[in-house]
Amino acid sequence: MNNDELLHIGSQWFSQEGWQPFPFQMEAWQHYLDGKSGLVNAPTGSGKTYALALPILLEFIRTHPQERGRQNNGLQAIWITPIRALAKEIQQAIQRAADGLGLQWKVAVRSGDTKAGERARQKKNPPEVLITTPESLHLLLAAKGYPDIFKNLKAIVVDEWHELLGSKRGVQMELALSRLKGLLPQLKVWGISATIGNMDEALAVLLGNTMQTVHYQVVRADMLKPIEVLSILPDEIEQFPWAGHLGIKLLEKVVPIIEQGRSTLIFTNTRAQCEIWYQNLLEVAPGLAGAIAMHHGSISRELRDWVENALHEGILKAVVCTSSLDLGVDFRPVDNIVQIGSPKGVARFVQRAGRSGHQPGALSRIYFVPAHSLELIEAAALRRAINEGELESRVPYIRSFDVLLQYLVTLAVSEGFRPEEILPEVRGTYAFSSLTDDEWAWCLDFLTTGGQSLYAYDEYKKAVVEQGRYLVNSKATALRHRMQIGTIVGDASLSIKYVGGKRLGSIEEWFIAQLKPGDVFWFAGRSLELVRIKDMDVQVRRSSKKTGRVPAWLGGRLPLSSQLSSFLRFKMAQLRHGDFADVELEKLKPLVELQASRSHVPDESEFLIEYFQSKEGYHLLFYPFEGRQVHEGMGALVAYRIAQLQAISFSIAMNDYGFELLSDSEIPIDKALANGLFSTQNLSQDIPASINSTELARRRFRDIASIAGLVFRGYPGKPKKDRHLQASSQLFFEVFNDYEPNNLLLLQAFDEVMSFQLEEARLRSALKRIQGQRVVLSRPDKATPFAFPILVDRLRERLSSEKLEDRIRKMKLQLVRE
């Protein structure tokens, strides 16, 4: 049967369903049937699943023209999805197509939620299509006789590849693909990705050395979805804005959007913000009770499943959510999307907007609710970035030795491995293409002896070598390893349960440690009283109190992307020149006029520095508009370089727009500028000298130690306490730092601090940009509208929310008095 006949069969099935295939789907079918690997670049809601599911089914029809109804054909295809919530939708779509084409195929899901009995049945009698996660795929590789499981495999599809790319799960996926390609040289590897700024690199990471040995193809959907960005504007603009004060005040303007639409998703950037908005919406509009729900990653799987099903069935009118609903969870397209606070990235904003009008060509409408006045500039910047098609790149992780060590133990636990066979496969990945012979030898030594520092301890001698094959013979080691496969390492969490036993979700240990029995806190939209903490369970009962603490989760702040910061500076220049073309910029006119009268509004060729004195001391503020993470590194660097000229100590505060150095003595800023304050010379030496890089690396090392298997996180239901894990990983860090400075895991921790936490490459390019700008050193009499939110952020670290609001009122009174 030739390709034309197969394409006709696929098109016929589409017609029976009342659809017509898009050109990109037909193109993907053709390339797949030609035996190519590749990448499908398509937005959410474009029919991308059928772009690759159909040719997998059609290929079977080609090789079995008279046996379409044949059963038990072995595992033909693996479909990787980054989040479990997507699996159900994909399963239904592929099963529908298989049934429609007359194939007796089973399409099954395997994830952390799959019961042991079902997993055993899958192993004994594999489905034809298995939808799974990177972690579950590695668990299959850890099974005895795994080559037999994959012997009939024809293709592997990695869905939402852009989500995996910028994380260690992407590295995990690369290594699994390298093994499957080693077993099955004819295996077709395909990815599905939304548009990102580095599509070529995304393809290179996915395919690795396959790009040199097989034909590959990128299939682009070219289906531009129109996106309408509508800002919810405050009635009055605060001339001295501060983060968080505005969003909740605009809540009453969000209620009509919910009430007028059939369905609305309200995206927040943090789980705490999600809880706060849910509570406040019910207070302001009690009529929404029963028609509104909440969805975030710490709520129990059962509750999230209920919310997803209720959305799918059209029962709910609104859901307040976090990134847990960013991706294509199966429900009908919603009428409206509301974004609370800036999403800090263009791609994230576009992804969320795409949840409305979730069909090809339909208009996506998204409402932007600023968390403070200055975020309105970000709304205007986002609109321009979308219109120009500028999206962020996803920086892939490379040389993640913690993931490599975990993978090698996975292979040693199952069939064992021969280094001469596995090394070429590992080097064939993008992540480890630069792996040296010495580094490989270090990894093998680490597996068998624990390395130079741990050779005296038997528990770190995980593998033995028998006739050239590396094996794990200890059943206890194998069990512990299988339980810890994965690269997602969160902060230690406790289960929240009613005294009667029903589970509500999970909460981080450090938050609960601050509470005592009888204290009230909010979780999953419920007011709960802490009864007791028993083992790893937080036992609670319902409370009638309306006030209580809202849990905070660590790592909640999103960094401003380089693309969005660039457009932010462009919009700032428009404000400087009085170009109020956007409604958001027009609304900011009073704030901008006050900023200009007190100090200066920079255009793209200028770099603004403000220097003034108050009762607190001497304030020096810089405005690179590069995002909090870059400002963290730049603030420390600038403080260090000034301190080299004069012995002086600073406290440093920052937000996404700038940073402040505060000192109790005069700051020699003119002298510092004359001495090349923003020079990129000696940057690699100055950054580690300016920050406590050892402390940052020590924190980073905790996750590395866990992924590499140095630290065991505990058995199900009996996880180790966070402080124990922290103490264990810190001990390893100290030992390696003192006695084995060339330990690859230790060096990796320092590399990750520079690359991902301080964004060294972006910091370097920001300094180069500043060097090419005209520095405007302004000396206002008192704090300006630009400075005010940074000053508030510094106070936020020290004061409770009630005391903070009182303090801010007093500060504003002082600033508005002439």
Image: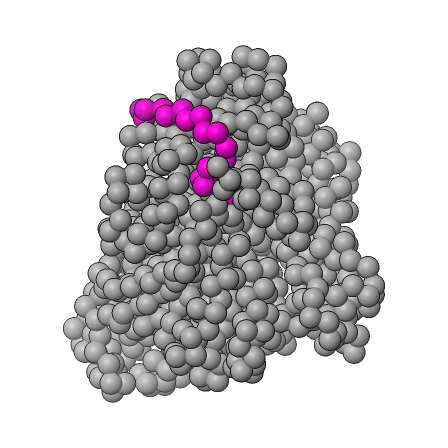
Residue 550 can be seen, yes or no:
yes
Q: Is residue 104 above or below residue 229?
A: below
Residue 777 locus on image (x, y percent):
40, 24
Q: Residue furthest front?
A: 818
Residue 676 locus on image (x, y percent):
42, 16
Q: Is residue 153 above or below residue 739?
A: below
Secondary structure that dominates the magenta span: loop
Residue 135 locus on image (x, y percent):
55, 59
Residue plotted at (54% across, 19% down): 667
**Residue 719 or residue 484, whichever sits in front:** 719
Residue 56 can be seen, yes or no:
no
Q: Is residue 649 rendered to the left or right of residue 428?
A: right
Q: Is residue 798 above or below residue 85?
A: above
Residue plotted at (32% across, 50% down): 585
**Residue 168 or residue 335, whichever sits in front:** 335
Q: How many marks?
A: 0
Residue 100 locus on image (x, y percent):
32, 85
Residue plotted at (76% across, 54% down): 514
- The part of the chain drawn in magenta is 772-789
Q: Is residue 517 rendered to the left or right of residue 579?
A: right
Q: Residue 78's quadrant in the figure?
A: bottom left
Residue plotted at (28% across, 63% down): 227
**Image quadrant in which the N terminus is located:** bottom left
Magenta stretch: includes residue 105: no
